[in-house]
Image (cartoon, coloured by chain):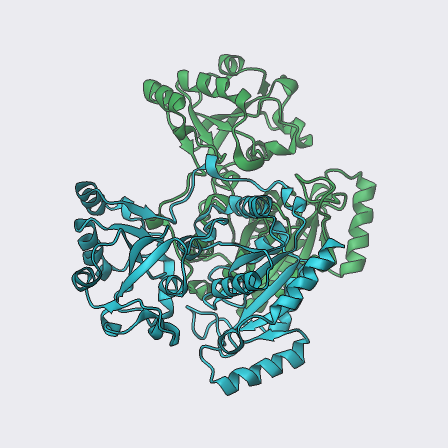
Chain colours: A green, B cyan
Amino acid sequence: MKTDAIILTNGRLQDIAAKTAHGLIRGTDRFQIRGVIDPPTCGRDAGEVLDGKFRDIPIFDSLEKALDTIGQVKYCIIGIATKGGILPEEMKPTIMGCLEKGISIVNGLHEFLSAKPEMVQLSEQYGTELLDIRKPKSRSELHFWSGEIYSVKSPIVAVLGMDCALGKRTTTRMIIEACAAHQLNAQMIYTGQTGWMQGGKYGFIFDSTLNDFIPGELEHAIVTCWKETQAEVILLEGQSGLRNPSGPCGGEFLVSGNARYTILVHDPKREYYSHHININKIPDVSDEIDLISRYGSEVIALVLNTANCSEEEAHRFQKQYADELQIPVLLPLYEGVNEIIPIIRQLISTDKK
Amino acid sequence: MKTDAIILTNGRLQDIAAKTAHGLIRGTDRFQIRGVIDPPTCGRDAGEVLDGKFRDIPIFDSLEKALDTIGQVKYCIIGIATKGGILPEEMKPTIMGCLEKGISIVNGLHEFLSAKPEMVQLSEQYGTELLDIRKPKSRSELHFWSGEIYSVKSPIVAVLGMDCALGKRTTTRMIIEACAAHQLNAQMIYTGQTGWMQGGKYGFIFDSTLNDFIPGELEHAIVTCWKETQAEVILLEGQSGLRNPSGPCGGEFLVSGNARYTILVHDPKREYYSHHININKIPDVSDEIDLISRYGSEVIALVLNTANCSEEEAHRFQKQYADELQIPVLLPLYEGVNEIIPIIRQLISTDKK
């Protein structure tokens, strides 16, 4: 049973910062997205703004207009992921407006609403909730790595990226859906706040976990998922990039999560690590594949994010990387991800041997 | 001005789990260590138990005996680091005894004393403090990576290990001291709770930091240190090992901390990652050096932890690795670390060019 919610992006819907909103517009099993508040794009459909596909999610220029049209909702979700997880000042009036109208807030930022006295006061006064989903768990809820990961008998595949904000989560979801359509029981381990918002059952929020417990939380999520679902294949939503200086990350999935296979996501037109234009060059894909192999994991496919490419360019890049790397190169935007299905079937049968 | 303290190891002083105590016995600028409570080794000197060097730190079999002999102290430091940071049940009576005698507790475990009502009640009743030094900072105290690291003009050297609990912190301290003795201004960035207890001014506690803020906290510590001390070289205390499944770690130092040089610590007799006997083999040192080079860092020396070797074996390993790797191989236990000084001088002069 999905709960009605609106998303607040406050003018940033077309920006990469709204990746939380983008994920929710693409699909969520936790919420029924009834609308988006984003003045510059108001009057349009959020799906059309995102990728040209109509999804019946209207965009409004204010909270009042939204509620006049769609009626009351239970939640307002803050739909952006800012650098450092700071809450933009200009969002506060709308958030407080929601609380006053009996709407609870879902917040995936590092800055917690429950630490703001004015928000707590309003939420108590109007009986609403402040869900800070990145709030760290306490020690007693956290798991330490034990090696139990080696009891999982199905192949584990990490979906890593050359950088952050490349579509790792979306790629993972598309593959899970393609597997389901082909009668394969594939399960996803979410590792970001959007994964939770989309209704993920197995996972944890990587970047708001105390470092010491990341391997154990990851292992616990995978082992629990495997025991409960008998998944034939488990996909791990990766985070950041192995050598992204603002948050190097990846060894945890490959080593602690025992992901002996990797699907690597890349934007062929992105030259520098995001957030740090002209400082740190993204390495060659072949060099990254070699690095990943040092962690004991084989890259079984490259996925190209071609949002900034023409269709012709996308196919040219596909051919170029396939020739160079001799692995399948997927273009989800133009061809979907079905090409991965026989490869996954192969993994499953090889692993069973 | 150092504050009087005793260390509680409760029978584990000779175990690797007491590495917090071992570091404090070796030296701390924050506390004056007056004694250790450890029944199996009572009557001996803690320095002699540790490495054969007398340090005038008596060992007692109980809190009462300790206080009878040395008089009152301000702090009792929990001297062990357990798997998962759990407080051993058998330590609780002594900790509560301390609180009742007006002694405050320094706790570097993940399990916080300030979350235990019985401890809080005693500490309030007797006016003592519960210092949970691994308690995570709040968002407003944390830094996000900005790229300011590239303003640091002195070489940055990461002291990494092939595994955890190999002596990375001790190696770092020894090198800092050797530099000082040779009129080199070297500074250390601590990254563990023991580093803080030893009086480190620049650093943070890596494993109790929310993952998203590790690169920024590291950068902030290095930049602040460089600005305030004009260090000629900065050494980063590493954590764990790059491919240790219970906590893979290292990219942060190399990429976010811009450590273009690495000193690698290794135990030539340790075959498997610690805590997980017979599961995960530690890779070859040459393979690790190659992996580190992929993160843009050059291994300038190998340091051997020869605590489990005879002197003859130690020298044999030294020759073997030096022949194979063609880099200096240090034996701190037998030869100190002075051999690193000309290498560091070389880095400083090369970097200035």
> In the picture provided, is A301 more to the left or to the right than B185?
right
Position above or below: B308 against A273: below
> In the picture provided, is B39 more to the left or to the right than B215?
left
Quadrant including the C terminus of chain A: bottom right
Position above or below: A31 against B38: above
Does the rendering let one see residue A298? no
The answer to which image quadrant residue B42 occupies is: bottom left
> In the picture provided, is A334 more to the left or to the right than B218?
right
Q: How many marks on residues?
A: 0
Seen at 49% across and 39% down, the residue is B142
The answer to which image quadrant residue B192 occupies is: bottom left
Seen at 39% across and 53% down, the residue is B30
Most extreme residue toward the bottom is: B312
Which percent across, then down, holds residue B289?
A: 64, 68
Quadrant including the N terminus of chain A: top left
The answer to which image quadrant residue A328 occupies is: bottom right
Which percent across, then down, holds residue A178?
A: 60, 48
Position above or below: A186 against B129: below
> In front: B60, or B29?
B29
Seen at 50% across and 78% down, the residue is B334
Which percent across, then down, holds residue B348?
A: 68, 58
Does the rendering let one see residue B231? yes
Position above or below: B52 against B69: below
Which percent across, then down, holds residue A288?
A: 69, 57
Seen at 25% across and 54% down, the residue is B73
